[in-house]
Image (tube, rainbow, N blue to C red):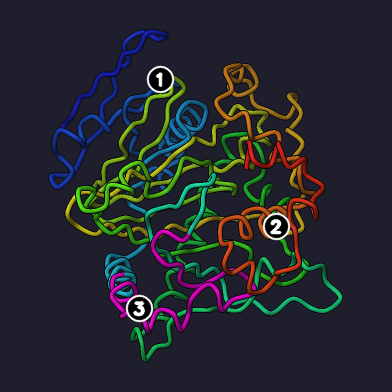
Amino acid sequence: MLVTATLSDSDHSKLTATEKLSQDQVGPEDESAAVAKFSKSFKVIPILDLALLRGSPAEKASFLEQFRDVMMTCGFLYIKNTGVSDDLQKRIYDVVVKTFALPREEKVKFAIEKSPVFKGWNELGKEVTYGKNDMRELVGIGYDNRLRLPSEPLWFNNLGPWNVPTDEQVPNFRATVTEYLAAMHNLALELLHAVAATLGLAPTYFDELWLNDETGREASHFQFNHYPSIDTESNPEWAENLGDAAHQDDDIVTILAQDMVGGLQVQNFDGDWIDVKPIEGTMVCNLGSFLEAVTGGRYIATSHRVRLNTSGKSRYSWPYFLQPKITTARWVEPLPDEMLPEEVRNYKPDVKNRYEAMEFNRKIAKTIGEYMFYVKQMKSYPEAKEIHYPDVDWVKELNIDPVLAKRFL
């Protein structure tokens, strides 16, 4: 079936694009998503086909042109034909659901409070984002890394050993997650190499810049999310909470797999929140702040959130975050204009900055590891912090103005 979708906004002329959709994708939501050209006032999210990236030179060029356009205007996209097998996706979904279905007394055995590297199960409502409790439970997994050495700084504890269910609790947990991590890492690298190609750079340019960790530890992160349905009539105190508060991903590339319940939203430059409705056979990909920084704001790390789930069904998602090595500098110098292709060089970043905290955040720590350990982990998981690091004041440790810390963090 050939679907045609139109998009218009106050700043751009009407844009029309077409995309062949398989029968199981056809429907009102999916038709609106089949838009290839966008403004920053986007109302729907585009679908890109990775089969084109792996196809003929002409097909690859077509993909890269679309990909560049999306990164400069939206920062979010659906990807199909990911190469991750249906069997593996079914098995990881089964592991996710069985993990959260464990009785509480089993989940506390791998609770985040037991981990000095802030990994493991975090109970519903215990995660704090910008001073509010997120209405989700999660399992932070990451990679099974070695412990910090005594000679290494404390913030090297941003990485460490797994704190996950045993195979007795969730059969095949470790083997399935290990297999899925390998598949997602390969997919993330394929997308990162495509980003480099849109900038006229060698495919592995960003690998050399960000991913070769001299400590031998993999910094990329993986987690399970469970958003139980909340009855706001019985629990009116939760009605103003979100499943996950608005934020940008502080990484390179994120790839999200989700069930069909929905709840993810992204924010356009008009400030409107746009639903990222689940589409069978796709994953959701978005750019992180490191790609926004290195392109001088031309490629966009878009703000997103998860609505409070009141659907009557549990929602599950399992995102993979391609992270730079922890010794990477927080402040990333933009690529010189002369290194950028004309299509990117001549694209001026929008002067309306929706992310006033971004520049502040990039300068409060020297490395990504410091920022993740002191700000993201200690702030988000205060109970675990008090158990493992009761004497550490992260605001003082990073010499942050307490007033600014309260405002921006």
Q: Going from the N terminus, do you reach mark 1 or mark 3 first?
A: 1
Horizontal placement of 319 versus 379: left or right?
left
Give the magenta range. Answer: 97-126
Q: Earlier in the sequence, mark 2 or mark 3?
A: 3
Comparing 98 with 251, the one in front is: 98
Q: Is residue 25 above or below residue 230?
A: above
Q: Residue at x 54, y 44 (%)?
A: 130
Image quadrant assignment for residue 245: top left
224 left or right, relative to 190: left
Magenta stretch contains residue 104 = yes
The x and y percentages for residue 312 are: 17, 54
| Residue at figure coordinates x 59%, y 22% from the top left | 353
Q: Identify the secondary structure beneath mark 3.
A: helix
Q: Residue furthest bottom?
A: 168
Q: Amino acid at mark 1?
A: Ser
Q: Residue 223: give x, y in percent of width and height.
A: 46, 64
Residue 41 - label: 1
Pick whichever, 104 or 299, lies toward us.
Answer: 104
Magenta stretch: includes residue 117: yes
Q: CA distance from mark 1 to mark 3?
A: 44 Å
Report the residue marked by disc 3: 104
